[in-house]
Image: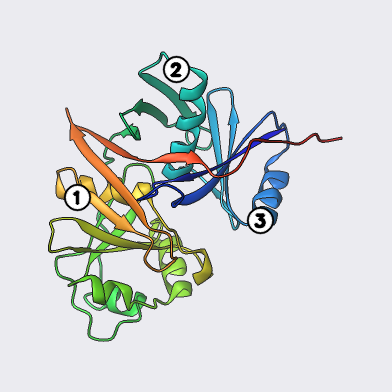
Amino acid sequence: MQIRALTCFGATPGTGNPALVIEGDASDEAARRAFAKARNTTCVYLDGDIVDFYYPHTRSPLCLHATLAVAHVLFARHPEASVLSVMTAMRGQRLELLRGEDAFFIRLQAQEIAQPELAGDLPARLLAARGLVPASPPRVASVGSPKLLVEVADADTLHALHPDLEAITAWGKEAGINGIYAWCRLPDERFEGRNFNHLDPALEDSATGVAAGALTALLGHGITLLQGHATGQSCLIQTQVIDGAILVGGRAEPAAVVQSERKS
């Protein structure tokens, strides 16, 4: 089994959201879940062109920061290629990987999502922010993992959120939505966001590529999105809209030397 440790979506070298890319492993789902929990980080198993994602608490149909890590590995293996592709293990979603000058991108399509009926006070209740009034109507959008997008007034409001994670999880299971992405507009025309879909606040994402893609689908144009203030990891996600497709990208770089492990 070969393990590569990378950081993804870092705003500067040495920062970013960690992921392990694992190859040559034939273990079953239970063992992969246990491994991700023991390592306490996102793991993506690369089986040929199949990518299988695991967080410490669950298996996932799609994780874009881990896909960015896979792009780094595969383009290093195929330096002549301009486009590569992989397929997700859980839902068979085809992901096209592209290489930019100093970043990797994942080409996706916005998905049709039925908008749930939302009580007016739902965002305030789930985000545990009494009196919160969203800056725009909350909407669900998706590029493979649906998010409820809730715009707040500014970065101070965003940073101060301490949501009811149990309530978000329960509501998400009932509604078929993978948590809340709270976001705001910054004065310099960039955006900032936080993702809430874990029961443990210590597991808050430093960068959530699927949410960046969902927000791009909602807005209809490319964005520069900051994330990671709450985790101390400065992350930056760039998106583009080209010919109806959404490209989500950023930096990916090795976090440690390549490790090799053998299983008996």
Give x and y (percent) for residue 174: 43, 63
Q: Find disc 3 in the rendering and name its residue.
A: 37
Give neighbour class at mark 3: few <14, some 14-19, many 20+ (Cα, 10 Å).
some
Please state which of the two labelled residues, at mark 3 or mark 1, is closer to the viewer: 3
Q: Is residue 244 above or below residue 151?
A: above
Q: Find disc 1 in the rendering and name its residue.
A: 218
Q: Secondary structure at mark 1?
A: helix
Give the tally of numbered discs: 3
Mark toward the start of the polypeptide (2 vs 3): 3
Q: Find disc 2 in the rendering and name its residue.
A: 79
**Residue placed furthest toward the bottom:** 130
Give neighbour class at mark 2: few <14, some 14-19, many 20+ (Cα, 10 Å).
few
Q: Secondary structure at mark 3?
A: helix
In the rendered structure, which amino acid carries the disc numbered 2? Answer: Pro
**Residue placed furthest toward the front:** 13
**Residue placed furthest toward the top:** 80
